[in-house]
Amino acid sequence: MRQDELWKSTCFEIFLRPKAEEKYYEFNFSLTPAWNCYVFDSYRKPQPPKSSHDFELSTLSWQNHVLRAEIKNKTGYREFNVGLTTIIQDKENQLHYLAIDHAGEKPDFHLQDSFILQRGF
């Protein structure tokens, strides 16, 4: 069920940055369903991103227009800044980038200033 490059078509993403850390995690979920989790030490580094097994996927389903993902946190981190984003591919194969907040001048989901939600696990 893990798959790379899900962001090249319709994909839902979650970015989690542990409080007071520069490192962050990126989760990708597609409608197929497929998923992946990457860890970055700092802004977009390393490239290519490295897969992370710090979180375990318990459930991934798409039913009645609802994507449900349950993730078990296996890290010692309990408080996170969160960014929620999505990429939508339309019928003309154009990609549209949506987020709760775009901190930069153009869409860049990795800008940590866009991780505006607070979440504890």
Image (tube, helix red, strand yellow):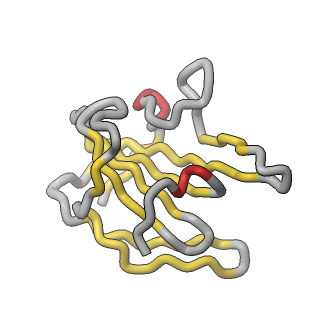
Residue that sits furthest to the right in the current view: 92
Q: Residue at x 51, y 53 (%)?
A: 13
Residue that sits furthest to the top in the current view: 105
Query: In the shown orientation, is residue 14 left or right of residue 41?
Result: right
Q: Quadrant of the C terminus?
A: bottom left
**Residue 32 horizontal/vertical position (percent):** 60, 73
Q: Residue at x 18, y 59 (%)?
A: 75
**Residue 55 horizontal/vertical position (percent):** 28, 64
Give the number of marks.
0
Query: In the shown orientation, is residue 66 left or right of residue 1?
Result: right
Q: Residue at x 55, y 74 (%)?
A: 33
**Residue 56 horizontal/vertical position (percent):** 30, 71
State which quadrant residue 81 falls in: top left
37 vs 39: above or below:
below
| In-front residue for pair 113/34 | 34
Residue that sits furthest to the left in the current view: 76
| In-front residue for pair 53/92 | 92
State which quadrant residue 82 falls in: top left
**Residue 65 horizontal/vertical position (percent):** 71, 73
3 vs 21: above or below:
below
Q: Residue at x 44, y 65 (%)?
A: 3
Query: In the shown orientation, is residue 60 left or right of residue 44?
Result: right
121 vs 41: above or below:
below
Query: In the shown orientation, is residue 101 left or right of residue 35?
Result: right
Q: Quadrant of the N terminus?
A: bottom left
